[in-house]
Amino acid sequence: MGKKVAIIGAGASGLLACKYTLSKGFQPIVFESASTIGGVWTKTIETTKLQTPREVYQFSDFPWPSSVTEDFPNQHQVLDYIKSYAHHFDLLKHIKFNTEVCGIEYEGSSEDEMQARSLWGGSGEPFSSKGKWKFVVEDKQSLSTEIYVVDFVILCIGRFSDVPNIPEFPSNKGPEVFDGEVIHSMDYAAMDYDSARRFVRGKQVTVVGFQKSALDIAMECSNTNGLEHPCRVLYKTEHWNVPDYLPWGVPLACLYLNRFSELLVHKPGEGILLSLLATILSPLRWAFSKFVESYITKKLGLAKYGMVPKHSFLQEISSCLISTVPEKFYDRVQEGSIILKKSPSSFSFCQEGILVEGESSPVKTDLVILATGYRGDKKLKDIFVSPTFQDYIAGSPNATLPLYRLSMRQFSKTVKIQIPHSHGTNINR
């Protein structure tokens, strides 16, 4: 009988993990807190589309159906594609729906012993006889709990769901003093589309943030309310949000998503040769960035709106912050149904709305939607019982992404756990 592998999450990564653990002769158990598969694609904003071209968001052994011809499929098409993958490989029978993992513990080794390890799992092998993982799982319908013991853990819980990132405010300057409503973009996405339209209709809406969710919600508010009730977008930093992935006709992947592009950047732990090569190629790295920046600035007319970022496109893409601009977004800015307002430092709430630091007059509003992202690090930490594993999983607070490169390498030496790429380890890149 094969080793038992626990997989948390039945989104794209979880399904891939399930399929490939089966192919290796293991026994996967997939825990999914929702009642269906699909992860973040099960609850989206109405206008949400895939941000990467269809060809590079594809399972290596399961192509998109011929009926999907769009370069950027919508959320329904993506969800149908993921569900088709699960049915094709008969994965649903391995999934326990409506089950929430309340805590994970590693049994068999002391905290001191685990901290002293220099090899993965203590032996350098993914499976060892020294210990196993214990799961406490709650059935969300019956509220009963059950304990599972497994040999290996794969976390596929995603970074962009469940735990919203809510800004902190001084006393008496938070949402509690505001006469209107304050929600997170997660709450907006959870509404059905008709309810979302009714919710914002006829209201002065302020969206806080300038990444994908903020832009999409602002467009939907503009569609609903038009010039009568313009939607304000309160942002701190301009971003190199892309209109498409063909700067001046050159695929962005040719510049940044290939083996050669890996040589252009310095990497933690690199040797002298790679460091020297990245230094020699730095002019080319700069040229690539300026090439893309010139295209985005021209295509979107950023200079006209004072929206040219002060940082480079290279910095943006290296920080995994790239998002696409909804079609005709800046047309709405020009007509006045979307108003961009910068808050360079901080903001607070008052009775009438939002008060930007340094300004005396408030931004009057009825509804504030915080499109301020998610606490993926907190979600990862909270799933572990041991403080040792909480520290390992979180990585450095200054890291671009938890577990990436340095922190992941150190963590993988210590515990028997894998975290796939958010789009799945075997999706074509």
Image (cartoon, helix red, strand yellow):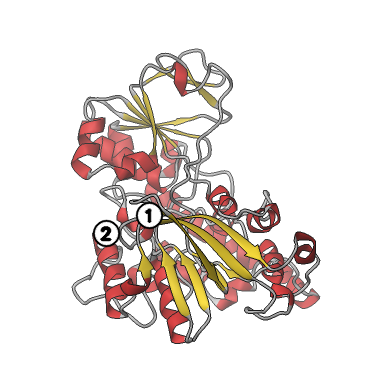
Q: Tell whether 198 sits left or right of 133.
A: left
Looking at the rendered structure, the secondary structure element under dot 1 is loop
Query: Is 254 above or below relative to 8?
Result: below
Q: Dots 2 and 1: beta carbons under 8 Å?
A: no
Q: Tell whether 41 sits left or right of 69.
A: right
Where is residue 158 drawn, in percent x and y? 47, 58
Residue 191's quadrant in the figure? top left
Residue 245's quadrant in the figure? bottom left
Work out whether mark 2 precedes mark 1 in sequence or the reverse, and give the earlier one.
2
Front residue of 316 and 46: 46
Where is residue 340 drawn, in percent x and y? 40, 33
Residue appearing at x 67%, y 79% in the figure: 129
Query: Which residue position holds label 2?
Result: 74
Query: Is 320 above or below relative to 419?
Result: above
Residue appearing at x 62%, y 65% in the figure: 285
The amino acid marked with disc number 1 is Pro
Query: Is 335 above or below relative to 261?
Result: above
Query: Which residue position holds label 1?
Result: 243
Mark 1, Cα crowd under 10 Å, few <14 / some 14-19 / many 20+, is some
The amino acid marked with disc number 2 is Asn
